[in-house]
Amino acid sequence: MARYIFVTGGVVSSLGKGLSSASLAYLLKSQGYKVRVRKMDPYLNVDPGTMSPFQHGEVFVTDDGAETDLDLGHYERFTNISAKQSDNITTGKIYSEIIKKEREGGYLGKTVQVIPHVTDRIKKFIKTDIKNEDFVICEIGGTVGDIESLPFLEAIRQFSNEIGRNKTMFIHLTLVPFLKSSDEIKTKPTQHSVKELRSIGIQPDIVICRSQQSIPLDQRKKISLFCNVPIQNVIETVDVKTIYEAPISFYNEKLDKQVLRYFKLKSKKKVNLTNWRKITKTVLNTKRTVNIAIIGKYVNLKDAYKSLDEALIHGGIKNNVKVNLIRIESDKIKKNQISKIFKNVSGLLIPGGFGKRGTDGKIAAINYARKNKIPFLGICFGMQMAMVEFAKNVLKIKNAGSTELTKNVFPIIALINEWNKNGKLIKGTNKNLGGTMRLGSYEAKLRHNSLIQKIYKSKSVFERHRHRYEVNNRLKDKFEKKGLIFSGMSPDDQLPEIVELNNHPWFIGVQFHPEFKSRPLSPHPLFCSFIKAAKLN
Ligand code: GLN
């Protein structure tokens, strides 16, 4: 039977609960155990799909087509276990299901309440789709003390009571600040946060203390005493220089060992951290840099392109270069400044995006990269804009455009309402915006002898999608005659998935998001090849 580890956070948000959960999952997996990692988000959106990246950072897409919290990206990158729809739930989703059931008469006669109906649904989520996993690590979003997370905390308290304390563990991550003026490390916020947790019936088994510097024994003892946890279970996590150090640092602090000891389990395999050490060293010591310009709408928000930033770093590690991201806000680009922007840039990346704002700048930049033979990678919206640029300037279709942005255009990019998935017709809609795009993993057949086939070294690939609009396939011959090749197609030949430019060192557009499948220990071939081309430029 699975053991359940619940990870909560206290004092402040953004302490790295996701990274801690992902690192622990990696270490337990390396000890020979089967692990799943899931996330419960206390907000009222059904999923983060309709939220602006300014609000929530990136929306991470799973193979099975769920739009999820970006922490699931951390989990996947660290554990190499593909997350599923069943690994992320929100308050919004729970309530919408319960209210639907209530309207259908599913609770006839009863008053529908937070306890037991909401808490029961949360408990069901925790166990859903768990088969032979040894550990289920379940992160609870938000901070202890928030009104919103209360039903989740109550549910995990009940859950542990039901399945037994020996099958559940509570890990609480807090901040242990350092006060410069008094030159002291302060444990009080941690004490208060644990007190808050205990007041709702949850006694943490491990307290992870995020700190700027190592926590001396005296302070650890204090945390142990006031928080009622054994001293070995006060684990510090000192700020790391790169996130790839996190599994190493948690291993040194014996987090995994303490977890196994708690559950009275033995390690089945010796943990080997050589690869993490190797990439940490590369990230910290590589001198040579490659400048990549990213032109998008949300470039100023750190987490808006999380997987993309990561994938580019992975590509850099593979090529022994540091990738320096030059983030440019698309609506700030003036046409006459383009050459200035590209002065020190070795590659251009236009990421996924929605809506009209900033598209002129993107198109002007793609035009420059195409003409000046600068390596270019267009992802989803980035590919769509590359097609529009080419149609306007090479095919001379003056009013070429995307119907997402302007109604009266010659549709190079347009809405399609139906597509094929494994022989089944899927219907899309743009009336209801949540969860109705072409989402998740789809196959693309790669053209023989194309650049993309050389990169993937394969005849077909599966990549994750998240878009509503598609390239107009009827113009294929026209594009190809002028050198823009449709080198990846959906298996039924209806949907262009990848385009590449002949007579250009590296110009590729992909309708999917390859960044979701890149891992630090197995970087995505497309990003490796893109960075290699930029390095040569
Ligand atoms: N807005 C575009 C579409 O819906 C592209 C989406 C994206 O880049 N993810 O098709």
Image: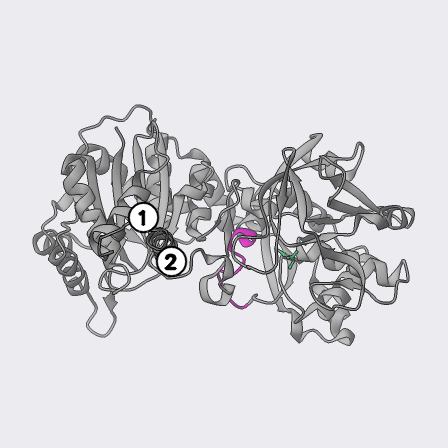
Residue at image mark 2: 92
x 23%, y 26%: residue:
266
Give residue 331's position: percent from left, percent from top: 66, 73
Q: First in sequence: mark 2 or mark 1?
A: 2
Start-end of magenta stretch:
300-309
- Location of ligand 1 given as a quarter of the image: bottom right
Q: Is residue 322 left or right of residue 277?
A: right
Would you say residue 451 sits in the magenta stretch? no
Q: Is residue 206 left or right of residue 103?
A: left
- The answer to whether mark 2 is within 8 Å of ligand 1 is no
Give residue 191's position: percent from left, percent from top: 14, 60
x 29%, y 64%: residue:
12
Q: Quadrant of the N terminus?
A: top left
Give residue 509's position: percent from left, percent from top: 72, 50
Q: Is residue 513 left or right of residue 376?
A: left
Q: Which mark is residue 106?
A: 1
Q: Which image quadrant for residue 408?
A: bottom right
x 55%, y 59%: residue:
432
Q: Which image quadrant for residue 385?
A: bottom right
Q: How many marks?
A: 2
Q: Which mark is residue 450?
A: none
Q: Amino acid at mark 2?
A: Gly
